[in-house]
Amino acid sequence: MPSSLVLGGCLQVLVMAATCCDLRHRKIPNTLVMAGAAAGLLLQGTLAGSGGVLAATYGFLVGMAVLMPGYLLGFTGAGDAKLMAAVGTFLGPLGAFQAALASILAGSIIAIGYIMFAVLFCQTASPMARYELMAKTLVTTGRPIYIAPEKGEVMGRKFPFAVAIALGTTGWMIWQWPLA
């Protein structure tokens, strides 16, 4: 139990600090992420020995692997993938995978709410005309095209994904973490 509290407390400090940085600057500093990953490795090694270091290493790789496609496709930033990797050092491979999926779910819900709010309150142009043109082109020519969002369109804006990682990770900890 004390080791779970230590890991959980340090992990919460990491995701909250990353969330504050992402909200304020739309960037997660590498120094924060690397310090978090190092802390996860050291804590796992101290609390669980060589098996803990191995679990932390695999957790790092799994956390990075789950969000890397999102980064490569432009859905998330590099800092988000690195943050999820650092989170993985605290959770191990299975925990990193489940927390990453919970984070993606949280991010999806946030994004849908963000889009609905912006469109419903007329704070941005609706992306529907652009989607309609892409769909018509696909149906008539059989070739998919991509039309980039207009300047100011809600789909062209980015939101701080560290918030989703913090919510997903915290939700996973509450749901799954063995505190007893």
Image: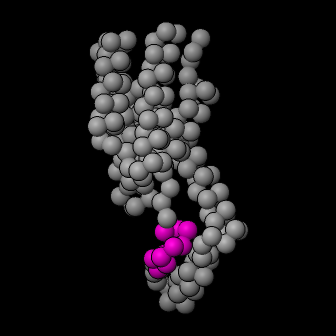
Q: Residue furthest front?
A: 24
Decide if residue 43 is on the left or right side of residue 101.
left
Q: Residue furthest bottom?
A: 140
Q: Residue shown at 34%/37% (left/top)?
A: 33
Residue 34's x, y, as percent? 29, 34
Residue 5's x, y, as percent? 50, 15
Is 92 drawn above or below residue 104 in the view shown? above
Q: Quadrant of the C terminus?
A: top right
Is 117 drawn above or below residue 9 in the view shown? below
Q: Is residue 17 visible?
A: yes
Q: Residue shown at 70%/68% (left/top)?
A: 120
Residue 17's x, y, as percent? 44, 35
Q: Residue furthest top?
A: 2
The image's colouring method is one colour
Decide if residue 32 is on the left or right side of residue 141.
left
Q: Give the prevailing secondary structure in the magenta stretch.
A: loop
Q: Is residue 66 visible?
A: no
Q: Residue shown at 33%/43% (left/top)?
A: 29
- State the image quarter where residue 11 is shown: top left
Residue 57 is a magenta residue: no
Residue 143's x, y, as percent? 46, 83
Q: Nearer the viewer, residue 22 or 131?
A: 22
Span of residues in magenta:
147-156
Q: Residue shown at 49%/64% (left/top)?
A: 157
Q: Residue furthest right?
A: 120
